[in-house]
Image (cartoon, grey):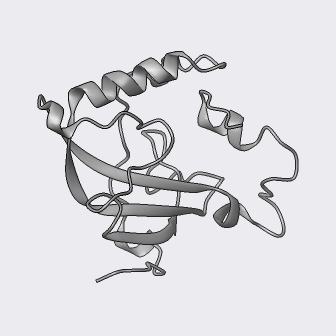
Amino acid sequence: EWQFQTPFYDGVFCNDGVVNILTPLNTYKNIGVQSQTYTIVNDESYFHDNLMYGMIVDENFGVDMTMYTGSTTGTSRDNDVCSRFAPITWQVDRKCHMISASSFDKMCEMMKMQKDDMSDDLHAHGSRMTVADHLTADNQVGNR
């Protein structure tokens, strides 16, 4: 059974032995982030009923992917302050997809039904500035 909670780190580190941030470092093997970018529209033909359980994968979504190691994100991370839990594995869909606003309404409804209080994630969050080139991983898979 999946457990969803806020903040993210509470869930990643709730079970002993899953992640080791010492030696040997295994975060990149056991922590992964999937990313998709959307243009939100008021058109129900773009409705997806399950944004809660991972990225959408079908004939159009999750097809043109790149993968690499990186850091966690957020406004508290930048080119001077990196996450101590890096590296993690990123899987990024290169395409920007259309999605209905009601898809996010449905996801928020599902978040409110979780055992843990997820109210801190029911609004948009900021993101960090793009990482400087000299700090960027050089191990992209599927890079063009």
Residue at image position (47%, 35%) is 52
Give above or below for 90 relative to 51: below
Does residue 63 show up? yes
Outermost right residue:
16
Q: Is residue 93 left or right of residue 76?
A: left
Q: Is residue 14 left or right of residue 131?
A: right
Give above or below for 13 relative to 85: above
Which quadrant is home to the N terminus? top right
Instruction: Provide residue 31's location: percent of width, then percent of height.
Output: 64, 56
Does residue 40 show up? no
Q: Is residue 135 left or right of residue 29?
A: left
Q: Quadrant of residue 44?
A: top left
Judging depth in this view, the residue of 128 and 58 nearest the camera is 58
Instruction: Provide residue 34's location: percent of width, then percent of height.
Output: 46, 54
Instruction: Provide residue 112's location: percent of width, then percent of height.
Output: 51, 16
Q: How many marks?
A: 0
Judging depth in this view, the residue of 58 and 78 nearest the camera is 58
Instruction: Provide residue 92's location: percent of width, then percent of height.
Output: 39, 62
Give above or below for 21 relative to 9: below
Q: Is residue 14 left or right of residue 47?
A: right
Residue at image position (35%, 35%) is 126
Which quadrant is home to the C terminus? bottom left
Residue at image position (65%, 53%) is 84
